[in-house]
Amino acid sequence: MYPFFFAIFFLIALAFASDADKRAELLGPVQVSRVHSMDEVKGSYKSPKRAMFMSLVVPGSGQFYVGGQSRHIRGTFYLAEEIALLAGLYYHSMYRYDKQVKKYRNFANDNFDIVKYETGMNNVRLDIYNAPDEFERFYGGTERESYCKALYGPNINTEKCSPFDGPAFYNQNQRPYHNPAEFYRVIANNNFVLGWNDAELNSEAINRINSGNYETILGESESRKKYIAMRKRANDLADRQAIFLGAIILNHIVSAVDAALSAKTHNNNLYEEKVSFLDKIRLGSDIHIGENFKAGAGLWYYF
């Protein structure tokens, strides 16, 4: 009698084992991870938002906050790059630019004379007999207005800004300009060439103007050409500011994104650990331990 029940019991166990093998073949290998308790991960969680914000403000700080050797290396790189870019911005776009601006302004102070310019333009006016009003509109237009306002302020009458018929301005080095930046920009224009110390009136300029060609160059000046080259050098240095600022912004953004992803990866690793050898044996034998379990065929299994 007992051998008969034992045989039945053994056949049932084989049936369950066969069903488990079929399920394993159908589902394939199951990746199992074990979740840590909150007590185990307490103090180790890193906020991705905080990491991102930290690196957005100071590149590399978010990586240091998350921790880990590889993240410390990347954080050091982002921080070093930030320092290098800021140093480059200051040196090229501020220090060297300011130095170049002082250089070309000093050159203009030594080589451009307001009285010489006004005298030369008055002499040209005296020689103009054909359409003098057209000459005044061309050489006394927008640039002349900017020139006068740069010297005396926005309320000056353009027709009264000459030292000969307006405020005294015989020594330009003793009186500060109302708008120095605008003044030094305007005097590089062709219309102000006669103010440079080495400028000579073009012998054909008067004839061309009288024939209606008002856009003719009144004279030539090597000092003016040198001044224009010095200003161009300053503008090139100023343009580098945009390059450095763009690189700095990009460094902040890349560092912030990297910090957020690093924090997320760090947190994911907190909740998983490799399955132990005993866990693998238990899973391979289709043994499951839970709150609700029943015994059957000598194996524990879930319903």
Image: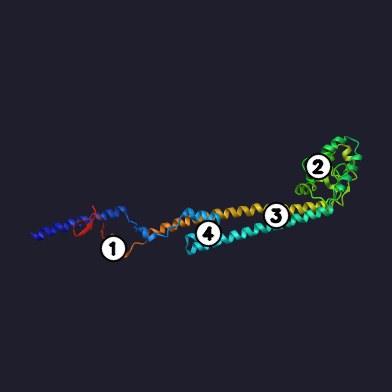
According to the picture, the residue beneath numbered tag 2 turns out to be 144
In three-dimensional space, the C-alpha distance between marks 3 and 1, rounded to whole angstroms, equals: 70 Å
Report x, y in % for residue 113.
85, 50
- Number of residues whose C-alpha sits closer than 10 Å to that of mark 1, classed few (under 14), some (14–19) or many (20 or more): few
Whether label 4 touches label 2, CB < 8 Å: no
Image quadrant assignment for residue 140: top right
In three-dimensional space, the C-alpha distance between marks 4 and 2, rounded to whole angstroms, equals: 54 Å
**From where the camera sits, is residue 158 visible?**
yes
Of tags 1 and 4, the one toward the viewer is 4
What residue type is disc 3 on? Leu
Report x, y in % for residue 286.
26, 58
Looking at the rendered structure, the secondary structure element under dot 2 is helix
Report x, y in % for residue 266.
44, 58
Looking at the rendered structure, the secondary structure element under dot 1 is helix
What residue type is disc 1 on? Ile
Whether label 3 touches label 2, CB < 8 Å: no
Nearer to the camera, 189 or 301? 189
N-term mark: 2 or 1? 2
Of tags 3 and 4, the one toward the viewer is 4
According to the picture, the residue beneath numbered tag 4 turns out to be 61
According to the picture, the residue beneath numbered tag 1 turns out to be 281
N-term mark: 1 or 4? 4
N-term mark: 3 or 4? 4
Report x, y in % for residue 187.
80, 47
In three-dimensional space, the C-alpha distance between marks 2 and 1, rounded to whole angstroms, equals: 94 Å
Whether label 1 touches label 4, CB < 8 Å: no
Whether label 3 touches label 1, CB < 8 Å: no
